[in-house]
Amino acid sequence: MDIALLNVRITFQKNEVVVDDIGNHRNAWTDIYSCYATVNGEGGSEKFSAGVLVEDSDISFTTRYCNILSNMETTKNRIIFDNEAYNIISIDHMNFKKKSLKFKCKKVRNDGD
């Protein structure tokens, strides 16, 4: 793997239950790891779904292998890149050589939050 290609900083987040000062429980995304990655497939497309224009953006991030990233779960983790959130669709262990990991992601839709 060419280290010079790892030119963007990404942050991995985990969905956890947090308790506030008065004891209320709620789900929140907390940062767990940050590293450099290579980005592929940044170009997105747009389509109409139920009369609404929806941005359909698939993107892949390739990182160096580490134990923290190899134990990621697609349902509990997401990636922050360029102040945008991306849900992890799949994790490719690149032939299990323990050199790199590829995360296939889809941009999180904000429905008027």
Image (tube, grey):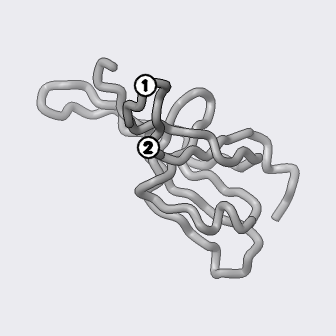
Q: Position of residue 44 (x, y in %)?
A: 45, 37
Q: Camera-side residue: 90 or 57?
A: 90
Q: Camera-side residue: 77 or 28?
A: 28
Give me the residue at 65% from left, 47% from top.
32
Q: Position of residue 66 (x, y in %)?
A: 74, 65
Mark 2 crowdedness (10 Å alpha carbons): few <14, some 14-19, many ≥20: few
> Given this view, does label 1 or label 2 mark the residue nearer the observer?
1
- Relative to 21, is 100 above or below? below
In the rendered structure, the answer to whether residue 29 lies left or right of residue 1 reads left
Q: Position of residue 9 (x, y in %)?
A: 73, 39
- Relative to 1, is 60 above or below? above
In the rendered structure, the answer to whether residue 25 lies left or right of residue 40 reads left
- Residue labelled with disc 1: 22
> Tag 1's secondary structure?
loop
Q: Camera-side residue: 104 or 113?
A: 113
Q: Position of residue 16 (x, y in %)?
A: 47, 46
| Residue 94 image-quadrant placement | bottom right
Please state which amino acid type lies under the numbered disc 1.
Ile
> Tag 2's secondary structure?
strand
Question: Which of pointers 1 and 2 lies earlier in the amino acid sequence?
Answer: 2
Give me the residue at 80% from left, 50% from top.
5
Confirm or deny contact between disc 1 and disc 2 (CB under 8 A).
no
| Residue 11 image-quadrant placement | top right
In the rendered structure, the answer to whether residue 45 lies left or right of residue 88 reads left
Quadrant, the N terminus: bottom right
- Residue labelled with disc 2: 17
Give me the residue at 61% from left, 73% from top.
93
| Residue 49 image-quadrant placement | top left
Please state which amino acid type lies under the numbered disc 2.
Val
